[in-house]
Amino acid sequence: MSNNVIIVGGNGFVGRELTMQWANRFPEAEIYITSRGDRKEIQGAHVHHVQVDVNDAQSFENALYGDEADYIVTLTYGSQDAVTTVRDFAEKHNLKAIGNVGIVNFGIPEMADFVTMKKEELKTLQEGSVRVANYDATVIWNKYRNDEIGKGIKNGDYDEMPPVSVEVVAEQLIDRITQAWKA
């Protein structure tokens, strides 16, 4: 059985870790990383970069070979078109599961809009017939994260939302995705 995967938004912080762990766990799997830009953060014999906008369902379909994939992961946020494209693609190609990273709702007013958006995206994915393997995270980090969130974590700004390492998020998501089809 193959474990080929499409990682939508795979050049980002979580996507890079997910790609590295997937390649280590399933060395023969073909990994298709999609992004709008031409970044190619992770290289490897089985890693394929596909420049495509997931918001354009027809272009996404034309750019990928869904019949060669077993799973798809969406690491996008803020676009119902993107999650609808992922859901419909998974259904059309009879994929085993869709992976998604959601967010834990800690009741922080500044996060309310983001939490609502991520819950709506998850709901859209779950409206389809393909099983959704979701991992709800808090703030995702690792010691190399030097953006504003990384600095905030080091300053204790997110203590009420205990940060979770990107390595744990990727490991848990892979476990949930690859086991979801058995349920």
Image (cartoon, helix red, strand yellow):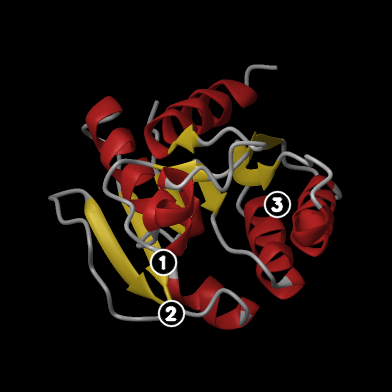
Image coords of residue 35 (percent x, y): 41, 72
Mark 3 to mark 1 CA distance (whole Å): 18 Å
The percent position of residue 155, horizontal first and vertical second, equals: 45, 47
SS at mark 3 in the image: helix
Q: CA distance from mark 2 to mark 3?
A: 22 Å
Tag 2 residue? 36
In the figure, 36 relative to 142: above or below?
below
Q: Residue at x 29, y 26 (%)?
A: 25
Q: Residues within 10 Å of mark 2 (few under 14, many from 20)?
A: some
Instruction: Decide which of tag 3 and tag 1 comes sooner along the chain.
Output: 1
- Residue at the image point whose x is 53% and y is 49% from the top: 72
At label 2, which amino acid type do we have? Answer: Arg
Q: Nearer the viewer, residue 51 or 143?
A: 143
Q: Residue flagged by tag 1: what amino acid is it?
A: Thr
Under circle 2, the secondary element is: loop
Q: Position of residue 27 (x, y in %)?
A: 21, 32
Q: Give the left or right position of residue 79, taking residue 100 as reference.
A: right
